[in-house]
Image (cartoon, rainbow, N blue to C red):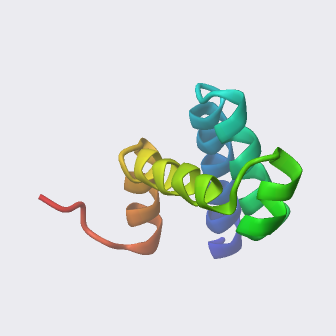
């Protein structure tokens, strides 16, 4: 039963992530996927994207802020058992 709940939460999280990033520009989506799915570092992403590693860092900081302000952050707190901050 517990595994099913974890699996359901993971599926729901993936659906929410897909929904959130579908609204982003192409560059942000690509950087997010290269970092989170393929585990590329800043330099690898920069080389693939034709930009500086510092610019990649700025994009990732912006992405982190958008995710922290999204419903995904609330879902993560719930699945980990953390209360919502006031």
- Determine the residue positioned at 64% across, 27% down: 25
Left or right for 56, reference 62: right
- Determine the residue positioned at 66% across, 55% down: 8
**Residue situated in front as seen by the camera: 22 or 63:** 63
- Determine the residue positioned at 41% across, 43% down: 70
The answer to whether residue 57 is above or below residue 3 is: above
**Which quadrant holds residue 17?**
top right
Residue 16 location (% of width, % of height):
59, 40
Number of numbered markers: 0
Left or right for 50, reference 42: right
**Which quadrant holds residue 6?**
bottom right
**Residue situated in front as seen by the camera: 70 or 41:** 41
| Quadrant where the C terminus is found in the figure | bottom left
| Quadrant where the N terminus is found in the figure | bottom right
**Which quadrant holds residue 22?**
top right
Residue 37 location (% of width, % of height):
80, 59
**Residue situated in front as seen by the camera: 50 or 14:** 50
Residue 32 location (% of width, % of height):
69, 50
**Residue situated in front as seen by the camera: 5 or 42:** 42
Residue 45 location (% of width, % of height):
79, 58
């Amino acid at each position: 039963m517990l595994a099913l709940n974890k699996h359901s939460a993971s599926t729901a999280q993936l659906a929410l992530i897909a929904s959130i990033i579908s609204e982003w520009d192409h560059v942000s989506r690509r950087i997010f996927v290269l970092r989170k799915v393929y585990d590329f570092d800043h330099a690898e992403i920069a080389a693939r994207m034709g930009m500086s590693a510092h610019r990649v860092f700025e994009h990732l900081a912006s992405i982190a802020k958008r995710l922290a302000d999204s419903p995904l952050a609330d879902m993560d707190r719930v699945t980990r058992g953390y209360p919502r901050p006031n």
